[in-house]
Amino acid sequence: MLRPVDEQQAIGLAAVAPLEPIDLPLLEAHGCVLAADVEALWPLPSFDNTSMDGYAVLAADVAGASEATPVQLRVVDDVPAGYRATERVSPGTAIRIMTGAPLPDGADAIVPVEGTDGGTDIVTITRSAEPGVFIRRAGEDVHAGEQVLRAGQYLSAREIAILAAAGHGSALVHPRPRVVVISTGNELVEPGTPLKHGLIADSNSYMLVTAAKQAGAAAYRAGPVIDDEDLFMRTLDDQLVRADLLVTSGGVSMGAYDTVKAVLSRLGTVEFTKVAMQPGMPQGFGTLGEENVPIVTLPGNPVSSYVSFEVFVRPLIRRMMGFANVTRPQVRASVLEGWASPANKTQFARVDLSVAEGRYVIRSTGAQGSHILGGLSRANALAVVPPEITEVKPGDVLTVYDLSREG
């Protein structure tokens, strides 16, 4: 009996948890998920400063300034960013100041340089200024001790910026899981190698490694490994030391040379099953070694392997990274042109997702065979066809995994 897709997903997700948090420098923490709330160590801004190049003044001194009635003030200091004024602004004086420099004592307004003649000894001002204008006050953005990020947030460039600005040089995060991909098969050769009759390029391992990296993992490639049980076992032993998750491609069906299934079945810690899905029916999941490293065995057909990664492997990576939502962003989309779907199986159809007249629409990228890489390369989404539907019709509305968004 075929196992439903959601049951197979649940088995894998129940076996993994977010990786133990570690403290990483900010550049290494980028792309990880925060493991603890973060507070600002100081206010932002940390001091009163100017938002414009210009002159720090007393608003009362320039209250009547205009082109017709200019005001002249004596310039007593010049303050670039990173320096403090050594003089105080008093009635009849001004201090030339650059954006970001601390507000001089006594000043209560900034006149932008565009409202002056740019003088360095005496400045002629032709624009009035209200008290507080063009001044950034300390703490107006963030107060000292205020929570700036919460546990579970993904650290993009924006979050790294607030961490750095708020006084943190590192962050406590769930590290990127180390994913090792092992492809198997006598027929596999390195991409770029001239093909002999009956051989194929090992596209799967490159596809799966890059997919794991896009999901956020630190991913590594091992193989291709020929259909030799001892060699495959040695490869597994070698790779276990650097893996938080193992992924194999090929060798899980019913053939005489399905090495992965033959080796792992003997260990008794990996269950092989058939899942009610197209493509990707043969699946395996279990753990290996003293550390119980999870392993997912994927079918060898390239489209089956990719779809299986999206459905079963990517959620594990995201769970290990600490994400609350482990699946791709999903939308509901209308079918433009119909296609056939197998009975009693959830079909993951490769489709082109777009927006027309304010709604999501999808169109099949062509033949849905498990070997059709061209159609996969043209797809930006997977349409999920429920097992009870055998004929997808124009106008039907389906749930769609948006492959263009990480989520």
Image (tube, rainbow, N blue to C red):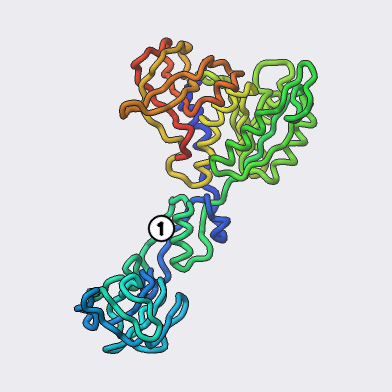
As helix, strand or loop, the secondary structure at mark 1 comes to: strand
Residue 199 appears at what percent x and percent y?
76, 20
Q: Is residue 99 left or right of residue 246?
A: left
Residue 393 vs residue 258, the one in the foreground = 393
Residue 229 appears at what percent x and percent y?
77, 27
Residue 211 appears at what percent x and percent y?
58, 36
Give the quarter of the image for residue 126: bottom left
Residue that carries the numbered disc 1 in the rendered image: 149
Give the quarter of the image for residue 179: top right
Determine whether 317 is above or below 104 in the image: above
Determine whether 307 is above or below 121 in the image: above
Residue 64 appears at what percent x and percent y?
19, 78
Picture residue at 44% right of the left edge, 40% below the top: 407
Q: Is residue 288 left or right of residue 159?
A: right
Picture residue at 39% right of the left edge, 73% below the top: 46
* Residue 263 shows in this picture: no
Picture residue at 35% right of the left edge, 66% below the top: 142
* Residue 112 shows in this picture: yes
Determine whether 128 is above or below 389 in the image: below
Q: Residue furthest left?
A: 64
